[in-house]
Image (cartoon, grey):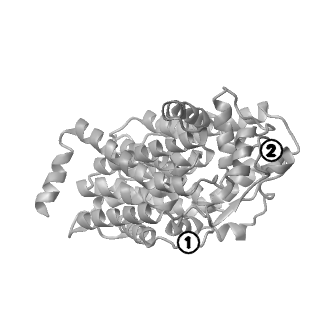
Amino acid sequence: MSHFYSRLDGFFQNSRKSWAGLAVFYSVIASALTLPFMKLHRALSVYDEFQYIDAVDKARRWDVVLSGDKTDQYARILAACRGAGLVPEYTIYQGPCASSVADTDTFIQGYTSADIHSPLYFFVTAWLSWPLQRLAGLELLTAARLTGIIWLALGMLVLAWALHRLGAHSAVVIALPIAVASMPVFRVTNSYVTPDALNLLAGSLILTSAFLYARGESSPWIFIAASSLFSIVKLQNVFAVVAALLFLFWRAGASWRSRRAGERMHPGMPDLALMTIIPFLAALSWLVIRRLTGVIVDRPALDGPANYTIKSLFTTIDDAVKIIFQGNGGWGISTPESFFVSLLTWGLFAALIATAFFDVEASMDERVFARAGLVSLLAIGPMSIAVFALVFHAHIDVLSRYVMVLVPLLCLPAAKRFTRHGSPALVCVFAFAAFAYAVLLRTVN
C-alpha cells in the first residue's frame, strides 16, 4: 500500500503531463457516467429541457430568447414524440407526434420560459454541439446533451486541482471527484441540456478562488471573473458567491482581531468591495436586460405567487442538507436509492464539522471556511425562497439544482481530514464502488 501511495504522490510531480492525463481520465469517467443514462432515457427532462433545447436551437440562428417568445417546432416535436420524463417510469407526451404541434397542444401554451436565463449557456452549447452534429451526424438534442460531459469532466478536474492545492492526499485528489460526480444529482443532470450542468465547475471554481485569495495565493480578479461569469450563466449560482463572500468577510474579521499594530487587514476592504459589487451587478445584468427587451404577454404561470411567512422560512433551514443527503435530482421516482450518496455525505459533513469545531489540526482559514460553509448550507433554503419571491414574485420549493453548486463546499475541508489510517485507500474503494453502481444501474436515485 505504501508503494501505491508513493506512486500516486509522484503522479503530480510532472505537473503539466499529470493534469493533462487526469483531464483525459475524467473525460472517460464522465462519459461512462452519462452516456448509458442518455441512451436509456431518451425523453426530455421534466426540468425545462424542452425550453432549453429550444433556446439552443434558436442560438444556432443567432436568435436570443426574450420574454414573450414562443417555442419553435423542433422542441415541440421532441416533447410530443419523445415525451418528457423518464423511460419507462414516468413520461408525458405533450401533443400529437406530428410535423407541426399547435400552441394549445404543447407546454405553457407555446411560450418559453428560457428567458429567465441569459443566452450565454445556450450559445456556448450551440457552438460546442455544432461540430458533434456535423462530424458524427447526430441530431441537435443528442449533440447538445453530449456537451454535459465536458462540463462534468471540467468540474471534476477543477475540484481535483482544488484538493491538490489544499494539500489533500494524492489518492483523495483523484478519487473524491469521481465519488462526487457519481452522485445522481450530478451524473443525471449532466445527461441533459441545462445550465445546471455547469454547477460542479461553478461551485468548485468560485469557492476555491476565494479560499486561495484568502491565503494570499490568488488574485481577487480570478474570483471576480469566475463569480461574474457563472452568475450570468445562471442566477442561482450566486448562492456559491454568497457562501464565498461570507467566508471572506468572516476571514477579514478574524484577521482584524488578530493583527498586530501596523499590519494590514487581509482581505482588505477595497478588495472585498470589488468582490461583492461586481459579481452582483453581473448577476443582475440579465434581469435588467430581460425587463427592458421583453414583451409582456399573458403567459401561464409556472410557479404560484410568492407566499411565505417567517415561520415557513424557518422550516426550510435544513432543506439543503436533506436534499444533499438525498442526492438525487428531485424526480420523485420510486427507483432504488443509492446508499453511496448517504455514505459520501456522512463523511463530508463529518469532515466539515470536525474542521469547524473539533480539536483537529486546522488553520484559521480552514476553520473559518468550514464554519462559513455550515452557515451557508443552513441559509440557502430560506435564501432561495426569499430571492425568488423578491426577484420573480413566485413561490418555489428548495430544489437540488439550487443546492448542488454548494457540494464542493463540503469537499474542500475534507482535504486535510482524509489523510491517515487508510482513509485515502478507503476513499478510492468507495469512489470505484459508487462509480460502478452508477454505470451499471443507470437509475435517477
Residue 31: percent from left, percent from top: 42, 49
Instruction: Say if 161 sits above or below 308 in the image.
Output: above
| SS assignment at label 1 | loop
Residue corresponding to mark 2? 101
Q: Which residue is found at the position 49% from the left and 40% from the top?
A: 272
Rendering quarter of residue 4: bottom left
Q: Is residue 64 left or right of residue 31?
A: right
Instruction: Say if 240 sits above or below 377 in the image.
Output: above
Instruction: Say if 160 sits above or below 311 in the image.
Output: above
| SS assignment at label 2 | loop
Rendering quarter of residue 349: bottom left
Residue corresponding to mark 1? 335
Q: Is residue 149 left or right of residue 119?
A: left
Residue 353: percent from left, percent from top: 40, 68
Residue 329: percent from left, percent from top: 57, 61
**Pointer 1 local density, CA inside 10 Å: few below 14, some 14–19, many at least 20:** few
The front one of 365 and 38 is 38
Residues at marks 2 and 1 touching, judged by CB atoms closer than 8 Å: no
Marks 2 and 1, how far apart at CA: 32 Å
Q: Which residue is found at the position 21% from the left and 68% from the top?
A: 422
| Residue projecting furthest to the right | 298
Residue 320: percent from left, percent from top: 56, 64
Amino acid type, callout 1: Thr
Q: Which residue is found at the position 86% from the left and 38% from the top?
A: 296
Amino acid type, callout 2: Val
Tell me which numbered mark, 2 or 1, is placed earlier along the sequence.
2
**Pointer 2 local density, CA inside 10 Å: few below 14, some 14–19, many at least 20:** many
